[in-house]
Amino acid sequence: DAGITQSPRHKVTETGTPVTLRCHQTENHRYMYWYRQDPGHGLRLIHYSYGVKDTDKGEVSDGYSVSRSKTEDFLLTLESATSSQTSVYFCAISSSTGSVTDTQYFGPGTRLTVL
Amino acid sequence: AQSVAQPEDQVNVAEGNPLTVKCTYSVSGNPYLFWYVQYPNRGLQFLLKYITGDNLVKGSYGFEAEFNKSQTSFHLKKPSALVSDSALYFCAVRDGNYGQNFVFGPGTRLSVLP
């Protein structure tokens, strides 16, 4: 999985609790992304980062925040989890150019269940 | 805004037969098209991409895809299917006018029957 790890791989939590998912890469790539995967929707972009402390919103960013204090780590936080955030979350990375032709490479995913 | 459609939720094909997984797209700028495959409980694996040039793109595991600008399509093909090709396939597009936004289709589940 292209030098990308995600932790935890599975998590069950309760509505209203904060949750943080971690993505770690060993490729030294500049761009990192968080997606969620839901049946019938494919993958939808939540947030992405184009460098340390540089982040931007994606298509479905409401209810999520991100942080990137080091090149290798990109954190996704659900401040107060809701049942609608039950999903599989994927981290992706792409190379340093930021070109629209760059390929994205995906981590193994985190399955989050909010009860 | 860009969008991707995969008109078939499920494709069934017999082992050894050719397979096609369909994808159509809509963008305002130049399209950059990608195919990914997802095996159970795994992340997405990159298969191939079209950037420019030859309309027939060859990728991993014997897959290829044909870009058709007039039909706004980018169908994934393989001449002879294997049981191990059974998986979920995603088409994705990037619009040259919209930077980092990578839009995925809903996915097509391919079942190759022995």
Image (spheres, coloured by chain):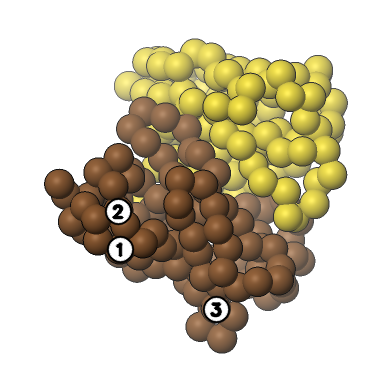
Chain colours: A yellow, B brown
Sequence order check, earlier mark of 1 and 3: 1
Q: Is residue B104 visible?
A: no
Q: Chain of mark 2?
A: B
Q: Chain of mark 1?
A: B
Give amino acid for label 2. Ala
Q: Which residue is mark 1?
A: B18
Q: Is the same chain shared between marks 2 and 3? A: yes
Residue displayed at 84% across by 26% down: A52
Quadrant into which the N terminus of chain B falls: bottom right
**Labels 2 & 3 near each other (Cβ < 8 A):** no
Residue displayed at 56% across by 86% down: B70
Q: Is residue A102 visible?
A: yes
Q: Is residue B25 above or below residue A59?
A: below
Q: Which residue is mark 3?
A: B68
Give amino acid for label 3. Asn
Mark 3 residue element = strand
Give the percent coordinates (x, y) of residue B49: 61, 56
Mark 2 residue element = loop
**Residue B81: assigned label:** 2
How many angstroms separate mark 1 from mark 3 (CA)? Answer: 19 Å
Mark 2 vs mark 3: in front: 2
How many angstroms separate mark 2 from mark 1 (CA)? Answer: 6 Å
Give the percent coordinates (x, y) of residue A22: 61, 18
Residue displayed at 77% across by 30% down: A29
How many angstroms separate mark 2 from mark 3 (CA)? Answer: 23 Å
